[in-house]
Amino acid sequence: MPSPFDAPVLNETVASVLLEAASLMGRSLQPELAINGMLALLADRLHLDKGRVLLPEAGHPGSGLLRIHYAHGLSAPERLRGAYALGEGVTGDVMRTGRIALVRDVSREPRYLARVTDMPPRGDEPLAYIAVPIMRDERPMGVLAVQPMRPPHNDYRSDLYALQLIAAMMGQVLRIHRRVEEKTRHLVNENWELRQNRRLEGTAYGIIGDSPPLRDALRQALRAADSQAPVLLTGESGSGKERFARMLHLACARRDRPFICINCAAIPEQLLESELFGHEKGSFTGAISAHSGKFEQARGGTLFLDEIGDMGLELQAKLLRVLADGRIQRLGSEREIATDVRIITATHKDLRQAVNAGDFRLDLYYRLNVIRIQVPSLRQRRDDIRLLASYFLNRENQALGRNAALTPAAIERLEDYPWPGNIRQLENVIKRAVVMGETARIERADIQRILDEEAGLAPPDGTRPAMDEAAPPVGRPYRRIRHEEGEAIRRALHQARGNKTLAAQQLGLTSRQLYYRMAKLGIPLNPD
């Protein structure tokens, strides 16, 4: 840019153009608005027409190819023709050298390529061309070019000075815009990484999902991981309580020690004590050798007692004594063995109700319920159904060498289903759909067929999931329940021979709406 001491005396028009250009920068730093506005000023006020700003090709800044990014007074074909290699023609030479180019008569300049506008007919007034570099850190970052639309003259100093100042303003706009873009890109990437990390918080431990209820449970579990306090995991069967227990173990300082799991509901009461505490040889019929129990096997690590609500009262008393004293005795032995285990328990039952009913010891409840984490059911985290279905589908495809895919309608049906069996049931449905599928496409009808086969099943606790009255079912508008609907529902169920999906279709309801109405109206879900 010329020194202020070399600046020509600017007339009022040029001065006003420069002021308005500066004002454009103040109003907007978006190149489309600021730069195009400056080009319009040059044409309308200074008669420097067909202005264009050429920059390195987007996405290929190192290729050296210049293309028109901003223009005024050029047609779309003219803009497309304006491409120059570095050093090619007058424009390419300005970009290569960083020097101003003033061509007073383009017909006499062999380097002028006339790609954007044609040469003037012979005998017409000469056509001038001016190109100035747009600089960044003393290196050209682009080119501003114009064609004066007035009779040529000898003194272009005022035009050149104005163009250099405008080019400097354009360079500033481009630099700021580029920095904003880089910052925005960085924030977008950072946000994406945060979302991925948030999702990976559970994924690293085999827990897949990103729904708010799951994230809340994960946050609680990760905060509790390094504590030695007992954790009680509650939630429906099949909701992933064992996954959470393993995550608690892997995220704590005991991760390199054993994780031992025992299902208290799967082992007869008379054998469960031996499994937990071990026994000596000959302590009972069939004890042909000494056996270490789960407490000993888990020394230094974590002992996970699943379905603790099914443990008998007598064994509950012995477990309480172990938790209080930190010592066990094998069956048939008087010797006490010190224990060093972190206790995690889980149940699908309401232990408070079991305490009130006399089926669970209150003192043991307080020992176990130090940190309580509610593992959400699948219908509470519907946003994760698609993600879980894709995970199970990919796993089955790899295992079976298939290439099955769920159609959008099939995914919609999965998301609409209440999943009384939770994640375990979803996994089973996807596996069956892949194994039994006759084509690579898993359609809605294929999913519906499998769900119909499971329609008579109830979850292990013998209850059906309650429908959410506050949330309108997907697919059809919510309607207030009327008592007179009961007869219509019974009639539809009778005609459909108990098939609730068909009955719902006859009534113009979704399955979720039908289940909810049956529960509200006292219609048995599984009549004898």
Image (cartoon, grey):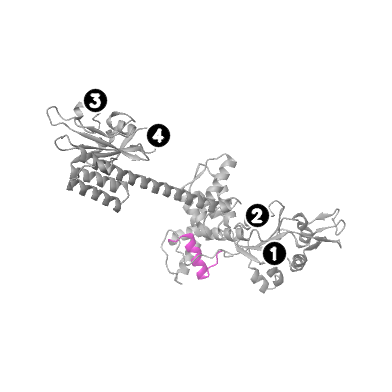
- Answer yes or no: is residue 185 visible: yes
Q: Is residue 399 left or right of residue 367?
A: left
Query: Dot 1, how many residues are within 10 Å of its Cα: few (below 14), some (14-19), or many (20+)?
Result: some
Say what amino acid the circle numbered 1 marks: Asp
Instruction: Depth check: give the residue in front, 154 or 371.
Output: 154
Q: Secondary structure at mark 4?
A: loop
Q: Residue, x 43% and y 69% (percent of image)? A: 480
Q: Amino acid at mark 3?
A: Pro
Which tag, 3 or 1, sits closer to the chain's start? Answer: 3
Residue 405 point in image, percent of width and height: 50, 44
**Residue that mark 3 sits on:** 110
Compute the Cα span from label 4 to label 1.
70 Å
Q: Is residue 350 above or below residue 25?
A: below
Residue at the spot of label 2? 246
Q: Report the magenta residues as a range.
A: 508-525
Q: Residues within 10 Å of mark 3 (few under 14, many from 20)?
A: few
Q: Which is closer to the viewer, label 2 or label 3? A: 3
Q: What element does badge 1 sit on?
A: helix
Q: Are marks 3 and 1 in contact (CB under 8 Å)?
A: no
Tell me the element at label 2: helix
Q: Tell me the tag on residue 62.
A: 4
Tell me how far mark 3 sits from mark 1, CA to CA.
95 Å
Judge whether residue 40 is colored magenta: no
Q: Between residues 498 and 379, which one lies in front from this camera angle? A: 379
